[in-house]
Image: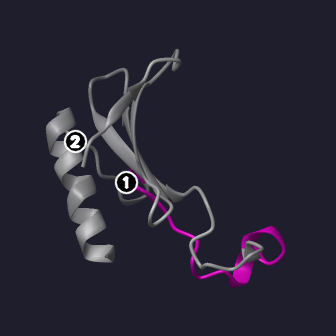
Amino acid sequence: MKFTKIKKRKFLETWQHKNRKTGIVSYIYSNPNGDYYFVISCFIKRCGLKECIRDRDKENCDKHVYYNSLDDELLYRDFDECRKAVIRWHRVWE
């Protein structure tokens, strides 16, 4: 899993990985204090419908993916540790 740095970010250093097959994008953010955390979300429709159900019925779409490691109070000391956690998350959900 390759992450590319988003160079336009002015506040938090950010890296992203997009999987076009599954429609999932993973972001790794660097806090100013040096810790890292990640966010995973769906960036396109995943269900295969011609019209994305999220546009009209967000509550009932079980294909939408969103996860933030801060919700579980998970911070990582370095980029590589955080990257490995993202890879583990993807393996669990594949």
Specify the label residue 11 is tagged with.
Answer: none
| Horizontal side of residue 82 vs 25, given as left or right | left
Q: Which mark is residue 69?
A: 1
SS assignment at label 1: helix
- The image shows residue 29 at horizontal and vertical percentages of 39, 34
* Magenta stretch: includes residue 67: yes
Mark 2 or mark 1: whose residue is earlier in sequence: 1
**Residue at 26% from the left image edge and 74% from the top image edge:** 92
Q: Note whether 59 is above or below 45 in the view shown.
A: below
Do we see residue 30 in this rendering?
Answer: no
Assign the C terminus to one quadrant of the image. Answer: bottom left
Q: Nearer the viewer, residue 75 or 61?
A: 61
The answer to whether residue 53 is above or below residue 69 is below
Location of residue 58 (image quadrant): bottom right
Q: Amino acid at mark 1?
A: Ser
Residue 31 in sight in this render: yes
Q: Quadrant of residue 17?
A: top left
- The residue singled out by tag 2 in the image is 76
Residue sitting at 27 percent across and 24 percent down? Answer: 34
Is label 2 in a helix, a strand or a loop? loop
Q: Vertically, is 17 above or below 53?
A: above
Residue at screen point 17% across, 33% down: 78
Identify the amino acid type marked 2: Tyr
Task: Indicate whether 47 appears above or below 44.
Answer: below
- Is residue 65 inside the magenta stretch? yes
Q: How busy is the neighbourhood of tag 1: few (under 14 within 10 Å), some, or many (20 plus)?
A: some
**Residue bounds of the magenta highlight:** 54-70
At 24% from the left and 49% from the top, the residue drawn is 1
Number of numbered markers: 2
- Is 13 placed left or right of 79 in the picture? right
Contact (CB < 8 A) between labels 2 and 1?
Answer: yes
Q: CA distance from mark 2 to mark 1?
A: 10 Å
